[in-house]
Image: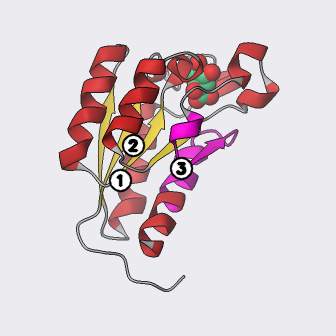
């Protein structure tokens, strides 16, 4: 695990519908930290490792798909919280499979302990792994997992 990281790693943090409201939306489920604060803490954590992180959020399926397509040429890994699209968007699933950029699925809440419809993820099979249930720290765990992956490449 001491392998050096290759230079200029770029990671995209992609958030889907309603995640722009993180911090005020159902705080008992998603916490009170805003998406902007989460993004700032990820930037800080990545900077200490010399890794660049970019951010994109959209409430629209097609925009998320376009951003995943663009990731083919502008990033090495994706941290994806697809929100409710996780549970039914075959189009997002296919986009991830099409670009072959290692993607970690993220959820702040423990989806397995919530409503039945949240127990299914149609994107999980095309992701390298899933982190769920740790609030905003789920994103940091996903970042650590991707970095570990790059060390092993
Ligand atoms: C979520 C879980 C989803 O089921 C939900 O639709 C979200 C957020 C999470 O981060 O816990 O929007 O992805």
Give the number of callouts: 3
C-beta proximity under 8 Å, tags 2 and 1: yes
Q: Which residue is mark 3?
A: 128
**Residue 145 appearing in the image:** yes
Q: Residue at x 58, y 54 (%)?
A: 141
Please identify the residue farthest to the right as the structure is shown. Answer: 113
| Mark 2 lies on residue | 39
* Residue depth check, mark 3 versus mark 1: number of the one nearer the observer: 3
Based on the picture, tell me whether residue 56 belongs to the magenta stretch.
Answer: no
Instruction: State the SS at label 3.
Output: loop
Q: Residues within 10 Å of mark 2 (few under 14, many from 20)?
A: some
Relative depth, front residue between 7 and 153: 153
Q: Which residue is mark 1?
A: 43
Quadrant that contains the N terminus: bottom right
Asked if 25 appears above or below 125 in the picture, the reply is: above
Q: Residue at x 71, y 28 (%)?
A: 111
Question: Does the magenta portion include 137?
Answer: yes
């Amino acid at each position: 695990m001491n392998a050096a990281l290759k230079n200029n790693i770029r990671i995209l943090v992609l958030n889907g519908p309603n995640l722009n409201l993180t911090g005020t939306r159902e705080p008992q489920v998603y916490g009170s930290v805003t998406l902007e604060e989460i993004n700032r803490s990820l930037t800080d954590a990545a900077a200490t490792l010399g890794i660049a992180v970019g951010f994109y959020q959209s409430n629209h399926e097609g925009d998320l798909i376009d951003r995943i397509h663009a990731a083919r040429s502008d990033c090495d890994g994706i941290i994806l919280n697809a929100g409710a699209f996780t549970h039914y968007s075959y189009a997002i699933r296919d986009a991830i499979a099409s670009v072959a950029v290692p993607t970690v699925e993220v959820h702040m809440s423990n989806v397995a302990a919530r409503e039945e419809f949240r127990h299914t993820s149609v994107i999980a099979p095309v992701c390298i792994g899933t982190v769920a249930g740790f609030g905003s720290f789920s994103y940091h765990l996903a970042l650590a997992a991707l970095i570990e992956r790059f060390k092993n490449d």
